[in-house]
Amino acid sequence: MEPVTDRPTAGILLRLLSGLLFAAMLVSIKAVSSEVPVGQAVFFRSAFALLPIVVFLAARGEFPAGLATRRPAGHLLRSGLGATAMFASFASLALLPVAEATLLMQLTPVLMAFGGVALLGESFTPQRGAAMLLAVSGIAVLILPSLEAGTSSVRFEGYLLGLLAALLSAGALLTVRRISRTETAASIAFYFVLISTLAGLATLPWGWTALTWAELWLLILSGLFGGAAHIAMTLALRYAEASRLAPFEYVAMIWPVLADLLIFGLPLSSGFLLALPLILGGAGLAALEGRGFRRLLRR
């Protein structure tokens, strides 16, 4: 394990960079979502994320030695949950604006906090209760307008898929908590991307679309952006405490909002504007309480 370096400015800048890269990945996927099947998008996003991750691990001297594992079943469970979350997230992104799909994924730390209580025997605290109350309130103001008479069910389906993606992501990260006692961050990241690539490839018999050059490059970029975002977040959490980085979750939401307004020409709904501070507030409370979880990313 590497010594932790307290470099808050570097950590904050890397967190901002990771938010920008993650948003760029989502924009790339959203741009092709009406033409490219979800499984095909998952394959390209995962396969091309391997390149920056492998280069990063090799530069740290963790490839291939760092991929040795004593918990193959744990990796399979974590990667299966994470890959399924990616499928649900991309399906949600095809039906919702980028900002709303991104906001739903911010529920992951809240669901992790309560999963820790239910599955890992962690204590239920007032902070966790407040996080859940804020998150539920945010979900309500975001989703309830879509239940009004005459409203298309497509948007509601997108919300359900987004919630499923957040739930599965929380399960994947709770699994990481368990296996990180014996497994390196290098192996956890690598096997997740590898299994996600294979899961996407397995959808080939159900029909992939012939890609234009523009679609191909967008899919390749989605993988490169996604892999680079993971690296930037890993480094950010090594250089700065989660408590210092949590406020920048709000800054990270700027990019999806701008993408909707300037690239896709989608207006911001009143439900999104009301839900934004509630969900991010709940996520911030949950993340601050779970700041010890960042140790697994220091390796």
Image (spheres, rainbow, N blue to C red):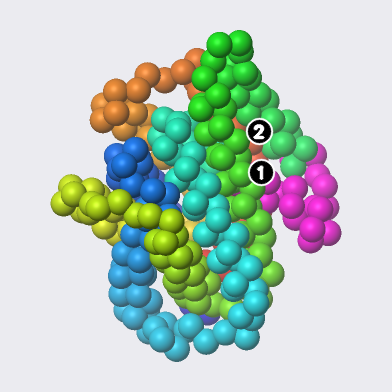
Q: Is residue 128 magenta?
A: no
Q: CA distance from mark 1 to mark 2?
A: 7 Å
Which label was assigned to residue 110?
Answer: 1
Q: Tell me, for residue 245, which label it has, or none.
A: none
Which residue carries the number 2 mark?
A: 135
Q: How many marks?
A: 2
Decide if residue 45 is in sight here.
no
Residue drawn at 50 percent across, 15 percent down: 270
Q: Position of residue 92 (x, y in %)?
A: 49, 39
Under circle 1, the secondary element is helix
- Image quarter for residue 148? top right
Query: What amino acid is labelled 1 in the image?
Result: Val
Answer with left or right where residue 165 lies relative to residue 73.
left
Residue 256, position as x, y percentages in the image: 38, 35
Q: Amino acid at mark 2?
A: Ala
Does 50 appear above or below 230? below
Viewer-nearest residue: 55 or 197? 197
Depth check: 83 or 154 in front?
154
| Label 1: few (<14), some (14–19) or many (≥20) C-alpha neighbours in 10 Å | many
Across and down, in percent, residue 5 comes to 46, 67
Residue 156 position in % (x across, y down): 57, 27
Mark positioned earlier in the residue sequence (1 or 2): 1
Rendered residue at 75%/48% (across/down): 114
Quick check: can you spot residue 218?
A: yes
- Residues tagged 1 and 2 counted as in contact (Cβ below 8 A): yes
Which residue sits at x=26%, y=57%?
220
**124 in the magenta segment:** yes
- Determine the secondary structure under disc 2: helix
Which residues fall within the magenta stretch?
107-127
Q: Residue at x 55, y 39 (%)?
A: 162
